Amino acid sequence: MDPFADKLLICGAFVCLVAIPELTSDKAGYPSWLMLQPWMVIIIIGRELLVTSLRAFIEGSGGDFSAKWIGKLKMVLQCAAIILALLYLSGGAEWNIISSGDQELLVQEFYRPEVAAQKTTILAQGLDYVLGTKLWRKAAFFSMLVSFWLTLGVTLISGFDYCVHATRMIRKKRERYEELKTKIRMSGERI
């Protein structure tokens, strides 16, 4: 049940994140394809379903389809992407910072201080205070983008790797079955 719970949490988190407009388009002028997109989430969910199905099929027939290092790396990157997205959102999902003399101003598309105060969480206010700057929000934004794309890349690579591994295992099992069938025929016994 543990792998199922992992899949449920990760897929559920990505489905929820892709529904948040601040994660799918950027108001600062960056192209929307850089942000989290529904097709990316479909690939992540599709890979999870495919590998889980392959694992169930192979282990159900007595094979060993243990997790590989690339699958574990994929899980780490998925968790990091989710955490960075939540950190980015905790800062009000706004990162445009203008330095004016010795002050840093957080600029929003339609800047209204009362809206900014409502969108910023206690975590973000604490980080602003501890770090003495709001620049961590920009770092969280770019780290989030990089983690989304790394997650997608490793998800595709690991999905392909698991498919190749499953194909080899199925082929070997079929070859062993054919060899056994040939030996039985040669000995004259009925199958």
Image (cartoon, rainbow, N blue to C red):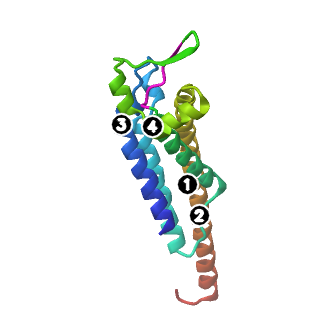
Q: Label 2: how many residues lie within 10 Å, few (<14), some (14-19) or many (20+)?
A: few
Q: Which mark is residue 163?
A: 1
Distance from disc 2 to disc 4, alpha carbons, whole Å, reads 49 Å
- 2 or 4: tag closer to the N-terminus: 4
* Residue 5 picture location, percent across and down: 45, 62
Q: Which residue shows up at 45% across the image and 37% down it?
A: 90
Q: Circle 3 is placed at which residue position? A: 20
Assess whether mark 2 and mark 1 are in contact (beta carbons under 8 angstroms): no
Task: Identify which residue, 172 or 164, lies in the foreground.
Answer: 164
> What whole-number distance in Å separates the C-alpha atoms at marks 4 and 1?
38 Å
56 vs 149, nearest the viewer:
149
Tag 4 residue:
90
Q: Of label 4 and label 1, which has the lower sequence position? A: 4
Element marked by disc 1: helix
Q: Say if 125 sits above or below 29 in the image.
A: below
> How packed is label 1: few (under 14 Cα within 10 Å), some, or many (20 or more)?
some
Query: Which region shows up in magenta?
Result: 92-99
143 vs 164: above or below:
above
Q: Residue 171: give its label.
A: 2
Element on which disc 3 rests = loop
Residue 112 at least partly seen: yes
Mark positioned earlier in the residue sequence (2 or 3): 3
Which residue is at a point 53% across and 17% down the rendered structure image?
A: 104
Q: Position of residue 36 (x, y in %)?
A: 44, 34
